Image (spheres, grey):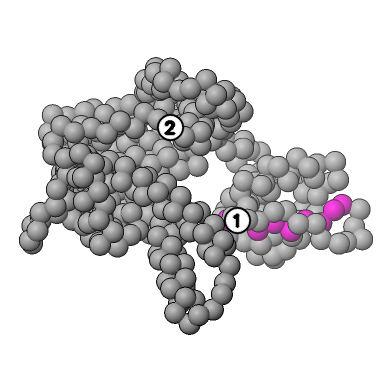
Amino acid sequence: MAGIGRADELLGLVDGADEQWARIGCVHDHSLSADIRHLLSHIVEVVRADRLLQIILLLQRHERLSARELGERLEVSTRTVLRDMEALSAAGVPVYSERGRNGGCVLLPGYRADVSELTPREAQALFAWSGRAALSEELGLRDALHTAMGKLAATLPVELQGDADALSSAIVVDRRRWFAEAEDTGALPVLRQAVVKQRRVRLRYASASAGLQQRTVDPWGLVEQAGRWYLVAAHRGAARMYRVSRVEQADLLEEQADRPDGLDVRAEWERLRSALETHRPVGVDVLVRIRPERIDQIRRIASPMLAKGEVARDVPSDDEWPHVRMHFRVREAACGVLLGFSGDLEVLEPADLRERMLELAEAAVVTYS
């Protein structure tokens, strides 16, 4: 909005240019200025109407915000916000501005704006989201989504319903990774309720490092990341992430959860994720030779294990078996995947990975002989 929102500034520049041309007695194309002025005036009206509505919605949600806070959210100046507040008040919207240290922009309680008129793009965006019904089903909200979309559809003009339905039926969201089983998200509805009600929850959690444990946490939020759900919560005051598929049981408690003032769940998630990725396992670049009839299968199975943005690359060779170079995210994962193909694949380099493969193969022979 910021770039378009400065159309009123451009309008002022056009008016100023006309004055300058007149002052120095030069002749220029006034029709062009008029066309530009008309276009910019239309842009200003459309953008300002949208901004006025956003001010009402923000004040409905937060009750009181300073002009500076509104300006930052809308990407406009404080002066523009104050002018918009005056325009809303003149139009009969019960808003007012309070001066002073604890002042701010206020909307009288009980007022609600009518925002039922959707644009075509807004309608398509909402119905496209309904294509992600799997998310709502995992959260225990599938039926609620269907009834809500039905109510919304009943309010839309016929021409909007057609486009929205067409996009919704054409969007398929498959969040499951290749060759991976679906995540067990049975505990998700309880965790959703705990987050919404801001109540503590007792988890029976199968930790990858410490085994099965029981712990009571303060839930902060839920994150869906590439088909996997995580609970962001505090345990003994420290922020943690818990993979929902590892939650064997979740019990909602009557105790109120402890949530820090000004909590930003997205920021906490980014911090936790960054800390995890900083200590990620060491990857490895591998050159292999593959039996020709198995190369397509091996490419498909190895692909999810490769580093982000990496693909299996062919390497020129006189060998009858194709040579392929692959960069795996995790060294041990490379050993496990490649050993699974036995005599259909041979690791050529690096030498230390060949040695590790031999150690694992000898250990398997001892185990199964």
- Numbered label attached to residue 307: 1
Label 2: element kind:
loop
Asked if the stretch drawn in magenta spans residue 122, the answer is no
| 352 vs 82: above or below | below
Q: Which mark is residue 118?
A: 2
Q: Quadrant of the C terminus?
A: top right
Compared across the picture, whether 168 is left or right of 202 comes to right
- Classify residue 366 by image quadrant: top right
Measured as percent of width and height from the top left, residue 271 is found at 35, 57
Q: Nearer the viewer, residue 37 or 218?
A: 37
Q: Amino acid at mark 1?
A: Ala
Residue 25 lies, in percent from the top left, at 50, 80
Q: CA distance from mark 2 to mark 1?
A: 42 Å
User: Nearer the observer, disc 2 or disc 1?
Assistant: 2
Residue at the front extreme, as displayed: 25
Q: Residue at x 23, y 41 (%)?
A: 91
Q: Magenta segment range?
A: 321-329
Q: x, y (%) of residue 170?
A: 61, 28
* Residue in the image at 27% along x and 41% along y: 57
Relative to residue 212, is residue 160 depicted above or below? Answer: above
Residue placed most toward the observer, 136 or 179: 136
Please name the predominant secondary structure of the magenta segment in the image.
strand
The x and y percentages for residue 97 are 14, 52
- Nearer to us in this view, 133 or 190: 133
Q: Earlier in the sequence, mark 2 or mark 1?
A: 2
Residue appearing at x 46%, y 67% in the figure? 14
